[in-house]
Amino acid sequence: MRLIGLADDFSHWLLSEDNKPESIRNHMFHFKEFCSFTEACGVAPQNLRVDVARDYLVWLTDRPNRHTGKPLSSATRLKHYGTLRLLSNFLMERKLLAASLLEGIKRPSRKKTVIQGFSVAQLQAIIDAIRNVRSAPEYKDRMSLLVYTLASTGLRISEALNLRGHDMDHNKRIMIVLGKGNKEREVPLSRDLSMLVLQYTRKYDIDREEFIFASRYGRPLQHSSVRDALRKAGKSLGTHLDIDQMRVSPHTLRHTFARLWVIKGGNTIALSRIMGHSSTQMTSEYVRLWGVDLNTSYDLCDPCGDISVPKFD
């Protein structure tokens, strides 16, 4: 028996454990990579042990990211670890494994990264650039509307891609979003965004029951296709506005919403509710980062502001 032969059963088990479709796709991607690793090492399913999982996690530290060529981030390796944990539970439930593959293996720590948010000029450049990733008019309109929606609402990419026409009340300028933990929340619509969505859905005859950001098959766009489009848009801009120093991704657009909200003096309680934070920790971090401009504050309180600057002979 090959481990890959359990792919369908594992996918069904993940569904029974209330994992969302996008999560299942990600776990199955990691599962298949683990299968390839074990086959390359000549390890049969019945011989899976902790040392195999440990070797795999070490191997991941050397495997380059297929898009950037850089080492895998700690966040990505943590996701692989999560898949191994679920796979262990599945195999133990099927009596194919006596103990967890991760027994005694320390959970990879997530590197604390600097939270980035685009400036207004950078955001405008990205919205313009993403229209040039492909030539099809509908693609141009869909992707530019999606980027504008993410930056205008602070939605997670999964939340935006699952929006249907009936989720938006254009009279009240409110949309109902299904967030983490299947929790619904209300998110305000700006007048401009409401107008753009109405124009887009009318232009492409999108019914209220249909997904707004759908593929040609009527299903929500894949997260990966959106990330790839943003990556290409960012790459096309090169060093313009220092965008090459930024991570051009859906989540950076979410941070951008928070950044611009805080800079403009928006209410932090409202921000937390709009973004669907389960606690105020993340909102407080946004305020810590962007609530005070240090240079502006210093200029206002410069201790030597009233002192004559020394003159050199």
Image (cartoon, rainbow, N blue to C red):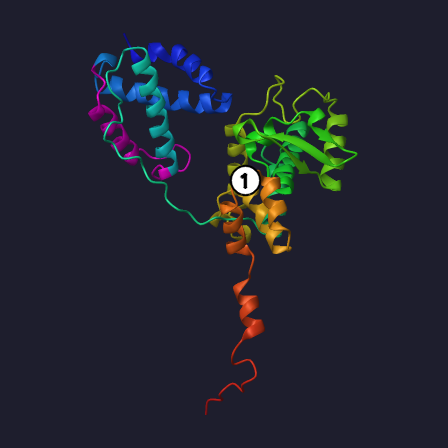
Query: x and y percent of residue 12 in the render?
Result: 44, 12
| Label 1: how many Cα within 10 Å (few below 14, some 14–19, many 20+) | some
The part of the chain drawn in magenta is: 47-74
The vertical placement of 304 against 131, above or below, is: below
What's under tag 1, amino acid-wise?
Answer: His
Q: Quadrant of the C terminus?
A: bottom left
Residue position marked by numbered label 1 in the rendering: 277
Left or right of 311, for residue 53: left
Residue 73 can be seen in this image: no
Left or right of 150, for residue 166: right
Query: x and y percent of residue 69 in the render?
Result: 37, 37
Query: x and y percent of residue 211 in the render?
Result: 65, 23
Residue 159 can be seen in this image: yes
Q: In which quarter of the image is the N terminus?
A: top left
Query: x and y percent of residue 282 in the render?
Result: 50, 45
- Residue 297, quarter of the rendered image: bottom right
